[in-house]
Amino acid sequence: MRDKVPYRFRWRGTLYNIIRIIDYWRDVSEWWRGEPELWFWRVLTHTQGVYELVCDPQSNQWWIYHVYD
């Protein structure tokens, strides 16, 4: 999954360029119930915003998990 490092994303019609990966980790939650492995990325954008992005590698879907003020 590390080969799928995000470098930009679009949110609410605006394109955000990622200038730094602050942290990343994976979460398997309740694997015994078949929940998917998710990868989390905390990133800094060119607007100085900090966001947590999540990727489900099975479906290759991304979404915003958290926006920091």
Image (cartoon, rainbow, N blue to C red):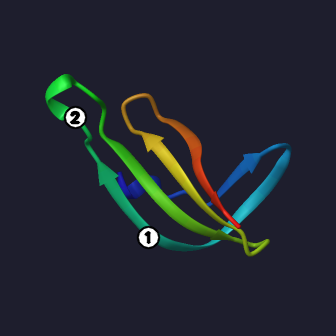
Crowd rating for badge 1 (residues with CA inside 10 Å; few <14, some 14–19, many 20+):
few
Say above or below: 40 vs 43.
above
- Identified by mark 1, the residue type is Asp
Q: Which residue appears at 84% of the width and 51% of the height? A: 14
Q: CA distance from mark 2 to mark 1?
A: 22 Å
Q: Quadrant of residue 44?
A: bottom right
Q: Quadrant of residue 3?
A: bottom left
Q: Outermost residue toward the front?
A: 69
Say above or below: 14 vs 59.
below
3 to the left or right of 22: left
Residue that carries the numbered disc 2 in the rendered image: 30
The residue tagged with tag 2: helix, strand or loop?
Answer: loop
Percent of width and height locating residue 33: 19, 24
Which of 66 and 3 lies nearest the eye of the viewer?
66
- Identified by mark 2, the residue type is Glu
Q: Which residue appears at 19% of the width and 33% of the height? A: 31
Q: For residue 2, which numbered disc appears in the image?
A: none
Percent of width and height locating residue 54: 49, 47
53 to the left or right of 3: right
Q: Nearer the viewer, mark 2 or mark 1?
A: 2
Residue that carries the numbered disc 1 in the rendered image: 23
Percent of width and height locating residue 47: 79, 71
Crowd rating for badge 2 (residues with CA inside 10 Å; few <14, some 14–19, many 20+):
few
Q: Outermost residue toward the top?
A: 33
